[in-house]
């Protein structure tokens, strides 16, 4: 995996800004950082002077606004980072690349251990390819997509969501529903991923795939059309949560 920071100017130029990738809500920032702690995820600190050090996020002190990274007091890279005072942290949660600035780096000694302390970030960038990781909903949850049949406007459909990615989803179309043709755009689709996770968007049907004979229906592979920043954030959060739940269940 690429542990170097993304060039934000280049990303902004390509995507028309960085809004789609920003996490700036304090509660969501803390949730992402806690995932790094709980997962003992490797974090690469890239100093402004070229120094680099791989570590883990040890603790979060939200009240004092501080982070602590594990550190080896004998590492020359650690001392270089302290001298630089600023660095960019890069870590991965599954296929999602996280990036945030760390400032005011200080080496803190405590008994036989030491840590790199810095200010809590006010902004985290999260990058994932549109064709990236797909998750299947946990079985006890039954997400649905509510939409009217494009050829029969009076027909309201509630289609089961089979899987979700940052750029689209797969829906199950039962055999007893009139078929849909690839290329059709479904407008005003209300996707209910959970009690508190809902979004409204447009979907373009990319392909129709046959399932096994017992399925009694087909798989609709759909792409989200011009997703908003809110839609992307909701999907990314849902993917993260589903991955964590799957790991907790041993799946």
Image (cartoon, grey):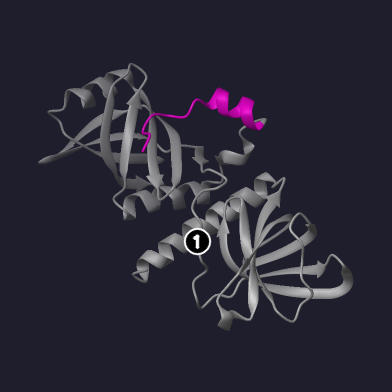
Task: Return the residue at label 1.
Answer: 135
Residue 154: quadrant of the picture: bottom right
Q: Give the x, y percent position of residue 17.
A: 65, 31
Q: Secondary structure at mark 1?
A: loop
**Is residue 59 placed above or below 244 in the rendered structure?**
above
Q: Residue at x 47, y 29 (%)?
A: 6
**Is residue 232 placed above or below 186 in the rendered structure?**
above
As drawn, is 38 to the left or to the right of 150?
left
As drawn, is 82 to the left or to the right of 111?
right
**Is residue 30 placed above or below 182 in the rendered structure?**
above
In this view, the residue in front, 96 or 51, is 96
Q: Give the x, y percent position of residue 61.
A: 36, 46
Q: Residue at x 51, y 48 (%)?
A: 132
Q: Residues in magenta?
A: 1-15
Q: Give the x, y percent position of residue 106.
A: 28, 28
Answer whether residue 195 is visible to the viewer in this image.
no
The stretch drawn in magenta includes residue 144: no
Answer whether residue 22 is visible to the viewer in this image.
yes
Q: Residue at x 12, y 28 (%)?
A: 74
In this view, the residue in front, 191 or 79, is 191
**Is residue 1 placed above or below 212 in the rendered structure?**
above
């Amino acid at each position: 995996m690429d542990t170097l920071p993304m060039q934000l100017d280049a990303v902004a130029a390509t995507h028309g800004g960085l809004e789609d990738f920003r996490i700036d809500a304090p509660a969501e920032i803390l949730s992402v950082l806690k995932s790094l702690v709980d997962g003992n995820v490797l974090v690469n600190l890239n100093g402004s002077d070229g120094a680099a050090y791989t570590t883990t996020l040890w603790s979060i002190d939200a009240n004092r606004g501080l982070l602590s990274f594990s550190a080896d007091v004998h590492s020359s890279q650690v001392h270089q980072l302290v001298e630089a005072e600023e660095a960019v942290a890069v870590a991965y949660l599954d296929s999602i690349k996280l990036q945030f600035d760390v400032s005011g780096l200080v080496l803190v000694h405590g008994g036989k251990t030491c840590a790199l302390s810095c200010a809590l970030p006010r902004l985290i960038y999260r990058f994932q390819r549109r064709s990236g990781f797909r998750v299947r909903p946990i079985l006890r949850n039954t997400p649905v997509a509510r939409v009217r049949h494009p050829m029969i406007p009076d027909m309201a459909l509630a289609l089961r969501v089979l899987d979700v990615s940052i750029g689209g989803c797969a829906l199950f179309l039962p055999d007893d529903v009139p078929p849909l043709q690839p290329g059709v755009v479904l407008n005003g689709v209300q996707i209910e991923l959970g009690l508190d996770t809902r979004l409204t968007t447009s979907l373009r049907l990319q392909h129709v795939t046959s399932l096994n004979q017992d399925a009694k229906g087909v798989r609709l592979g759909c792409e989200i059309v011009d997703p908003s920043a809110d839609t992307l954030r909701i999907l990314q959060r849902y993917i993260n949560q589903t991955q964590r739940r799957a790991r907790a269940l041993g799946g």
